[in-house]
């Protein structure tokens, strides 16, 4: 991908460093628009189809706000039950139908690879808004943007990814992005929820320094950035397995203060107990700022794939 115009954004694995930086710089320019200080209509007349076949609050609303803050409009489908997929329509047929109405598709689906299947069927850009335990490229781009903004750099940082690294799609996409930088990655998870080999192989191939451990407290002592994740309940076939892992790592205020009070704390949200509420008081608690960056990053992606600029 040389230019984003007309392109799909399905995975971060295929992004080059210059493409990643293009998104970061473009997102920076959109911050005043995302923060409601300025307005623009660069996507006037364009329509985004928002297809969310799995639950979402932030991603759906931030994609839709991003499109509307660019002057574009949105049509949407929420949940399989209310769509023709429930009648047995294939993803590629659904995509062809949607292509007749919309200029760009943002899709979330429980099946890894579903956005790619749709993208293969149509000519308009398809943006993956999360495909099961696969990837979540737009979240990872906003995560990277947040690290850059919070720390002023990415190179040289020790970044600790914690929790369900097996099923957590945001950490897969984020690891692919971080593989382009000079970072020390510490992957903290129970052995059963380790980062998939496909991702760690990519890290190894790119020469990234990384380690895998179950030792949360020890890892925190080295953390410049601690990225917490939720154990992905909906991906467990056996509820007892989920119960076994659900409280495995909990970041408390005391733990942050004992290990490195300066660390930046991130979470893609929703949190379900992995970060104690009193962590919110710490200056390094960046998860709500991280969430706010979602609109600017999605404005950047929408404008790039639709070929519009400020
Ligand atoms: C994440 C997701 O959907 O993968 N949420 C989000 O998009 N902000 C993380 C999660 O659900 O745990």
Image (cartoon, rainbow, N blue to C red):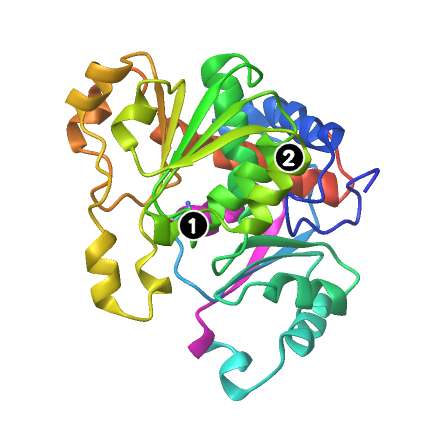
At 55% from the left and 32% from the top, the residue drawn is 296
> Dot 1: within a 10 Å radius of its alpha carbon, few (fewer than 14), some, or many (20 or more) residues?
many
Q: Which residue is mark 2?
A: 300
**Do residues under tags 1 and 2 come within 8 Å of each other at their CB atoms?**
no
Residue in view at x 46 percent, y 48 percent = 59
Residue occupying the point 77% across, 41% down: 4
- The location of residue 8, given as percent across then percent down, is 72, 52
Q: Is residue 191 left or right of residue 149?
A: left
In the rendered image, the quadrant that contains the N terminus is top right
Between 109 and 235, the residue placed more toward the observer is 235
Instruction: Return the residue nearer the eye: 83 or 208.
Output: 208
Q: Position of residue 114 (x, y in %)?
A: 60, 66
Residue 47 vertical position relative to residue 207 in the rendered view, above or below: below
State which quarter of the image contains the C terminus: top right
Q: Secondary structure at mark 1?
A: loop
State the residue position of label 1. Answer: 168
Disc 1 vs disc 2: which is toward the camera?
Answer: 1
Q: Is residue 38 visible?
A: no
In x, y percent, where is residue 70? 62, 39
How many residues crowd around disc 2 within 10 Å: few (fewer than 14), some, or many (20 or more)?
many
Q: Nearer the viewer, residue 185 or 24?
A: 185
Q: Is mark 1 within 8 Å of ligand 1?
A: yes
- How many marks are shown on the rendered structure? 2
Q: Which residues are magenta?
A: 57-81
Tell me which corner region of the image, top left, top right, bottom left or bottom right, holds residue 145. Answer: top right
Q: Is residue 67 magenta?
A: yes
Q: Residue furthest right?
A: 2
């Amino acid at each position: 991908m040389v230019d984003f115009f007309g392109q799909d954004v399905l995975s971060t694995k295929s992004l080059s460093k210059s493409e990643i930086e293009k998104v970061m710089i473009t997102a920076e320019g959109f911050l005043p628009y995302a923060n409601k200080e300025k307005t623009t209509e660069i996507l006037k007349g364009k329509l985004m189809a928002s297809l969310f076949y799995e639950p979402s609050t932030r991603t759906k609303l931030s994609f839709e706000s991003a499109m509307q803050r660019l002057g574009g409009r949105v049509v949407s489908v929420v949940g399989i039950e209310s769509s023709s997929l429930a009648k047995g329509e294939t993803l590629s047929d659904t995509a062809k139908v949607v292509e007749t109405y919309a200029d760009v598709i943002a899709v979330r689906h429980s099946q890894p690879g579903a956005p790619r299947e749709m993208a293969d069927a149509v000519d308009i850009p398809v943006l993956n808004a999360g495909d099961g335990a696969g990837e979540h490229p737009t979240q990872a781009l906003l995560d990277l943007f947040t690290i850059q903004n919070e720390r002023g750099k990415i190179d040289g940082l020790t970044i600790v990814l914690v929790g369900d690294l097996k099923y957590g799609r945001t950490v897969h996409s984020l690891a692919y992005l971080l593989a382009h930088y000079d970072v020390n990655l510490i992957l903290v998870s129970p052995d059963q929820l380790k980062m998939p080999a496909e991702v760690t192989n990519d890290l190894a191939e790119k020469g990234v320094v990384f380690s895998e451990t179950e030792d949360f407290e020890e890892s925190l002592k080295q953390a410049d950035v601690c990225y917490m994740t939720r154990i992905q309940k909906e991906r467990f076939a056996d509820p007892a397995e989920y119960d076994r892992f659900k409280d495995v790592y909990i970041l408390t205020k005391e733990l942050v203060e004992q290990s490195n009070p300066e660390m930046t704390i991130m979470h893609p949200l929703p949190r379900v107990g992995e970060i104690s509420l009193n962590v919110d008081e710490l200056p390094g608690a960046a998860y709500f700022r991280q969430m706010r960056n979602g609109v600017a990053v999605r404005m950047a992606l929408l404008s790039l794939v639709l070929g519009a600029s400020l």
